[in-house]
Amino acid sequence: MVVSEVPKLASAAEYFFKVGAEGKKFRPTVLLLMASALSMPTPNSIAVEVASSFQKNMRTRQQRVAEITEMIHVASLLHDDVLDGADTRRGIGSLNFVMGNKLAVLAGDFLLSRACVALASLKNTEVVSLLATAVGHLVTGETMQMTTNAEQCHSMEYYLSKSYYKTASLISNSCKAIALLAGQTTEVALHAYSYGRNLGLAFQLIDDVLDFVGTTASLGKGSLSDIRHGIITAPILFAKEEFPELQAVIDKGFDSPANVEAALDYLGKSQGIERTRALAIEHANQAIAAINALPESDSEDVLIFRRALVDLSHLVITRSK
């Protein structure tokens, strides 16, 4: 779907879809598993040929949502790297580092435009609204991160809201879109949304842990990147609850390596990492509960894919990269 009359633009837009730089494809994997987990039996009254055509068309539309979601996600990464001045992403040079900020921004815009065209082709206003909302949330979350004041900086509630907008909204609204395209009820669609929301939050919480305990090689980005950019995440917030004096260090900012070391010292003495993992597990369990709340199914195939979604919840909280 990434086609342009300008080769340079097409090359830039495809940069993170190429072999070796395509990432984990976490979101498309979740969505395609959800599509199979919500598969509905075809009524016997419908002819086999008609049923087969219907199922194929529905699957194509759901796959298109997975593709659109990944395009939106990658576009947000391109824009984020420009805003952060990042020089690496996924273990290679970031697009803005390799081709410059202007082309990186334009490539992100181009991906969003192609995603919009693909979204319109689905001809489902509710699905369009869900994905458009998620794009708005990405912008909201990034703005929240850039404009955080002193009070918000120390608020766990603010941090979780920002994390939802930046990470969980896209996957949760996409899961709901998958359910709607499958012809599921509003109740089932809300369970799909809840799975995506809680899985996304768990993913972000573990990401925040790995920023402190991971390595540059495993993360594909500079270790301690968040705190060096002055971004306060759950491990530091939990550490501050145990050591209120950490707030004075945070207030000074992290331009100084000494302040970074001081914050890490407090974090090491605290239960910040452990409590963040515990919160991630709590959200993963809520994601699993959403899958278990789905209507019973006699299809072994459907049950296999539901178990895969449960397994994925476990993988999210045990991953090391």
Image: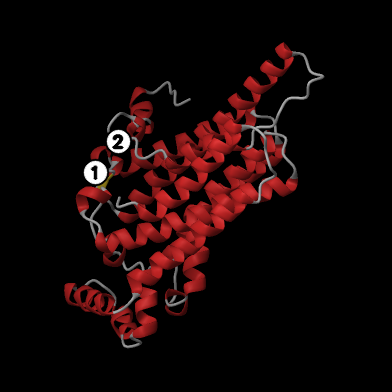
- Local secondary structure at mark 1: loop
Q: Residue at x 24, y 49 (%)?
A: 218
Position of residue 289 measured from the top left corner of the image (x, y, whole percent): 59, 55
248 up-or-down from 131: above or below: below
| Residue placed most toward the observer, 123 or 6 | 123
x and y percentages locating residue 178 in the rendered image: 62, 38
Q: Residue at x 51, y 47 (%)?
A: 310
Residue 80 shown left or right of residue 260 in the figure: right
| Circle 2 residues within 10 Å: few <14, some 14–19, many ≥20 | some
Residues 28 and 307: in front is 307
Percent across and percent down for residue 288 are 55, 53
Q: Are marks 2 and 1 in contact (CB under 8 Å)?
A: yes
Q: What is the residue that sits farthest to the left in this orientation?
A: 258
Residue type marked 1:
Gly
Can residue 214 be spotted in the picture? yes
Q: Which mark is residue 21?
A: 2
Write down the residue under mark 1: 91
Question: From the viewer's perspective, is residue 304 above or below residue 134?
Answer: above
Q: CA distance from mark 2 to mark 1?
A: 8 Å
Please name whichever residue, 160 or 257, is drawn nearer the observer in this view of the structure: 160
Q: Looking at numbered disc 2 in the image, what kind of residue is underneath it?
A: Ala
Identify the residue shown where x is 35% and y is 67%. Answer: 231
